[in-house]
Amino acid sequence: MTKPDYAGLCDQEGTLKGALRRRSILRGAAALAVAGPAALLDSRPAQALTFPYFFDFANVFERGELFKEFGDGVVAAAHKVGIKIKRYNNNNEPELSINNARLMIQDKPNLILEYIGIEGIGASIERMVKQVGIPMIAINVPINGAYWFNLVNREIGTDTAKVVLAVAKSKGWTATDTTVIIVQGSSAGTEVNDCVRYFYVTVAQEMPGMTQAAPSSITPLTTTIGKSGLQVDGKGTLTDSYAGVKNVLQTVPANRNILLYTINDDSTIGAWRAITESQRQKSTLVAGLGGSVASLQQLRTNPQWVAEGSIFMSDWGQYLIAMGVAVMHGVKPPPLTKCPQLILTKQNVDKYYDAVGKVKLLPPLVPSNEYLAETGVLQQFHNIEGLS
Amino acid sequence: MATTIAQSGVPQAQPQRKRLMEVGVQTLGIGMFYILILLFFSFASAEFFTYSNSVNILTNVSVIGIVALGQALAIISGGFDLSVSGVVPLGAVTFALLTNAGLNVPLAIIVVIAVGGLVGLANGLIVTKLGINPLITTLGTLSIGVGTAYSLSSGVTIPLAHPSAGVLANQAWAGVSYYLIAFIVLSIITFLMLRFTVFGRMLYAVGGNREASRLAGMRVDLVTNLVYIQCAALAAFAGVVVTSQLLAGSATVGADAALTSIAAVVLGGASLTGGVGGIPGTLIGVLVLGTIANGMALLQVPAFYQQIATGVILLLGVGFARLRETVSGDRA
């Protein structure tokens, strides 16, 4: 299939010629895709690309370090390539998310970037957006009919477990003296909670003697996993995770080692605080997920904090904008466009993050994401390993 | 409620002895209910009736307990304060920011309490001078408080730059934290104030019959303002406590402080119409809620069922106390 010529639509200054409407752009792109040589793309510097589109963007939250930075990153990335963007806050409320969807449809954007926090309202949004034919990218939580951008929680959980296990085994910890505590956020849905689920499953598989469990058997209602595991519902927040773990620690004998993992950094910080307040830090290994400033500091300074799943959320914006540009040019993305994700350890954290917790390098693109590089958008940020 | 004017000129909702007996009966009712809960969990879970778990329960209820002390004052005086759900996060974030900026802990605590007091003063003035009812007033200040907390923190969790700033969470003795000691001290002070001071009696009078109290020459507006100031100041201090617990200030904390504290106060025997209630009952109400959460966590009851159970037990608890009150009233 001939690739779209993203640069062929630009004049010498790199701006799209005239005030092209979306359909004109698509027709033009299709025509150039047939006639335009690849040399047109090669001859233009990546920095020259700008796209006069209008995107609407609804963020799940505008609070909490992760989500605030993510939202800011999306807007900054859009502005960098000349895309007009309007920002909404779903505040993780179903009714507000639906209202925002209506407002976004009223805006008549070229594309919608939608981040809902609660699985289950997607069908309602899908129905509204489908009626008007606006393409949509669903972020994190899938929406039927929308292109999907997400971390692969299962991989994050599995990879994190391997790092943590290596450290636990080096300390001589075994299934007979170790308990796994996972902290879920039940309302976030199955996909998001896959990370903690597969964390336990991987630990159990690699540590003989642990109660084995199929991922599907660990549900939001699960509180114990045999004699080896405990699940707490931290609701993804600092205080609920703190309170939940504080209570459940009473059931874990003082001489047990603990492997602790949650669905996000706020949860991990709250849960870890419960551990330290109970004076159990020396017999606990913890891994975070999110790459927040506070957690990176823990990774660097706390000997018990041995891994940090980073999904580079603050830099999702450039991937989403590239994805949006690709969609606008008629590209059909794969079923899942993976976000950049990596398990940071004490050995590699400095390669990807600076001392104050800002991303300085993103991991290489996975093969299925090469189509994003072809838009030329990612190159404008100069921060992806192996992509110039 | 019928009002009598005592010889001192201070109107009393009812003879003090009778009121105290009523409060005592209510407290006894909820107290017995709490004992039943303790017995149940003691038998159901081997880890429940241990020293460390007892300290754990007290630690867990400290924050909401401090908020409930202030809420009790508000409810007894005939109002209630929803803004605590905004003042707790505001206090938490402000404390984190101040200590991270280098302010010493005692001064930071004073500043935070003063900020809370100002919010309370605003509540009181709006209720007394503008005549807006407490529900709308405190709902408005709740929203302002939460929004301010988010604005100050830019929506992110603020770790304490120096863990020593969380000194209240340090353990003073045998696993007991300083903030737990502070909670106990505040409870005693509030109890003594309500029970033995003129202000306390005025509070009950205003709650019992505001108009009669005003006609009797009592400065009801001043009493109301002082109540809201104390309530919000305590909520701000609760924010300091939660930041010390978590070693981080966040605008997300305390979201359920208003409803939980009201539930605890009502569970403890207070009436939403005012004039009735007390600190011992409030403390038992707080302990009931905290013990239920703790006990069900020890029994590994899924979180969804915990919410159902908490609601059922809340209704049973209030019903039990009311039943006992009715029986005692019949005998009298």
Image (cartoon, coloured by chain):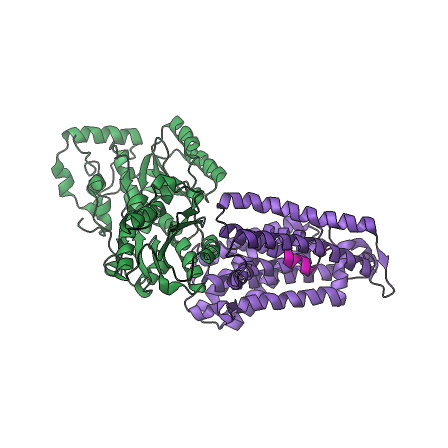
Q: Is residue A247 left or right of residue B273?
A: left
- x, y percentage for residue B217? 82, 61
Q: Which of the 4 image quarters holds residue A271?
A: bottom left
**Any part of residue A214 in sight:** yes
Region in magenta: B274-284
Q: Is residue B79 visible?
A: no
Q: Nearer the viewer, residue A23 or B313?
A: B313
Residue B275 inside the magenta-drawn segment: yes
Question: Which chain is painted in purple?
Answer: B
Residue B192 found in image quarter? bottom right
Residue at point 49% right, 65% down? B244
Q: Nearer the viewer, residue A22 or A350?
A: A350
Q: How many marks?
A: 0
In x, y percent, where is residue B214?
80, 57
Which tint is chain A?
Answer: green
| Residue A310 image offset from top left, x and y in percent | 30, 52
